[in-house]
Amino acid sequence: MSTHFRYSTDHRSFMGMSTDLEQMLAVIDFATEENQLPPRDWEASIAWIQSAETDDLIPLLEAFTIRPAPQTPVAQNLVATVLQQLAWRAGSRADNNDTLPPQHLAALYRHWHGADATRVWLLRCLALQYDHNSLTTFAELLVSDPPVDAATALTPLFQSKNYDPAALFPRLLDGLSYTSLAVLILDLANYTVREELLDQHPAEDRQSELTQLLGGLVRELEQLEQKPQAAATRPNDAERVSESVSLAVSLCDALALIGSTSAISQLYQALELRHRRLRLEAAASLIRLGEDEAQQALIQLAGEPVVRLRALAYAQELDLVDQIDEKYKTPIAEAEAEVAWWLAQPTQMGIPPTTCELVDSRTQHWPGYDAPMPCFLFRFTYQFGNSQYSNVAIAGPLTHAFATSFCDLSAEDAYAGFAGWHVDHEEIYEVEIDPANPTPTVTEYVGRIERDGYEVLTPSLLGFFLGEQTLVAKAVRDGEPGYVLLENTDIYWRPQGPDDPQLLAVDAYGIHKGHKLLRAFN
């Protein structure tokens, strides 16, 4: 087997192995950075999993169970794709009761203890099978040996109603002691009640425990708010605040769904905190528990862009929407809220902007949509002491902002930049150029540009647009730096003066192709 793979430059040499399983295991066992299948060949070698019978997949699980967890990034990636195929198969066959034996999945999960990035797909497979035995096994494994990325495992349960949550609860509630699990478990419990999968909240018997937990979190957040601002924004404290707020929000929702009037005092305390998301959840929960005094707080929170959309949704649910100021219900106000919420996500800035001002709004056709779309550009600013950061974001067909500043671009260029980035088409893409090893085509294009009076500093990328090819190069013209784009016989120049945004080559090309798209659509 090893001899076949050693000479893997000719991939046909091991494609003739006796079984699909043996072939697949050989690739995994002997893969290195230098010695691995091209992605397409690997995908072809594991495609059999999707249509395999259960009896044919048990040997696969058994083979993994006698192997150690994959150690190298290459092996981990290969094994993860195999387990993802199993999870996909589980989801596609759930209605046919064609499930993998939970005990085999559990045995492999335990055997690969610590290899969370890989084995989490086994939990997802159990979740996607939806039968009683799979879900009981899932709950036991999740609580007794939680993975780092529990969201990957739990997500399918938020996307379906075709299962009995009684197989999960109350065992899942034992995971509330884990920081990484508590929010997800409470949110799932809340989901099962809200979607009427259960008549009674799974945590109803634990409402005293939940109330005490909320009270403790509120006190902790109060203490953090009393710290000097510089200390409160330290990474450790910021992480504690984020975790505490997320859990407190889930607790507010759970206690309201349970109907726990004994938590009213703690909910009012949460309403006094500075964090807008938590205040909104506390207000909504209090109103659901019959506390009309909290209505004004919810109505006022519609004025805060970062929570405006959720405040409007709660106001609609609680028959308070007519009391919300009309200026917070306009398309522009909702678009501003989209931008503020997007920027506040941990994967973006992490906090809402200090200010967010409308730059432009128009209705236009947009790639990927059949009807014209309302489009909005906002200039947002973050004030950090004596310094500030500003940029431009789009809302409407998408919500996005670049790391590169778009502040000095015209509205037309900004829309084009976002459209060029947003388009998804197999015949529209870019390929980076290695300046040290340009292809003959690149060399020819550079020569044509230089004959036109440009000094090419660096050829950056080739853009492909529905059969057309464009060279983007960093260049100088008349002493001014910028990007030059050659497309067919046409040359386009985008200067980069000292006061202009310092665009990347991909941004310059994005604006160029975005203009082509928007002209074609409009």
Image (tube, rainbow, N blue to C red):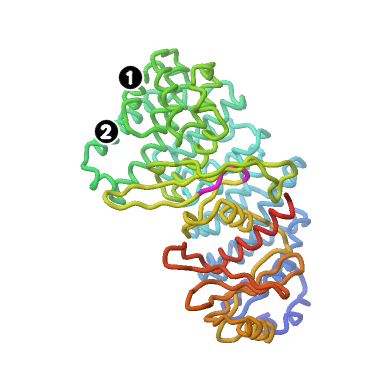
Q: Which residue is mark 2?
A: 222
The percent coordinates of residue 485 (x first, y second) are 62, 72
Q: Is residue 16 above or below residue 436?
A: above
- Tell me the residue at 69%/53% (across/down): 518
The percent coordinates of residue 79 (x first, y second) are 60, 64
Relative depth, front residue between 477 and 113: 477
Q: Earlier in the sequence, mark 1 or mark 2?
A: 2
Relative depth, front residue between 375 and 166: 375
Q: Can I make out residue 271 in this image? A: yes
Type of the residue with mark 2: Glu
Relative depth, front residue between 209 and 17: 209
The percent coordinates of residue 351 (x first, y second) are 39, 44
> What mark, if any, has residue 265 been given in the picture?
1
Q: Is residue 86 above or below residue 436?
A: above
> What mark, if any, has residue 142 been given in the picture?
none
Decide: few, some or many residues near mark 2? Use Cα within 10 Å; few <14, some 14-19, many ≥20.
some
Total numbered badges shown on the rendered structure: 2
Quarter residue 225 falls in: top left
Type of the residue with mark 1: Ser
Mark 1 to mark 2: distance in Å? 15 Å
Can residue 396 be found in the magenta stretch? yes
* Mark toward the viewer: 1 or 2: 2
Q: State which region is magenta.
A: 393-397
Can residue 163 be found in the magenta stretch? no
Q: Secondary structure at mark 2?
A: helix
- Tell me the residue at 29%/35% (across/down): 221
- Say whether residue 423 is left or right of residue 305: right
**In which quadrant will I find the N terminus?**
bottom right
User: Mostly what secondary structure, the magenta segment?
Assistant: strand
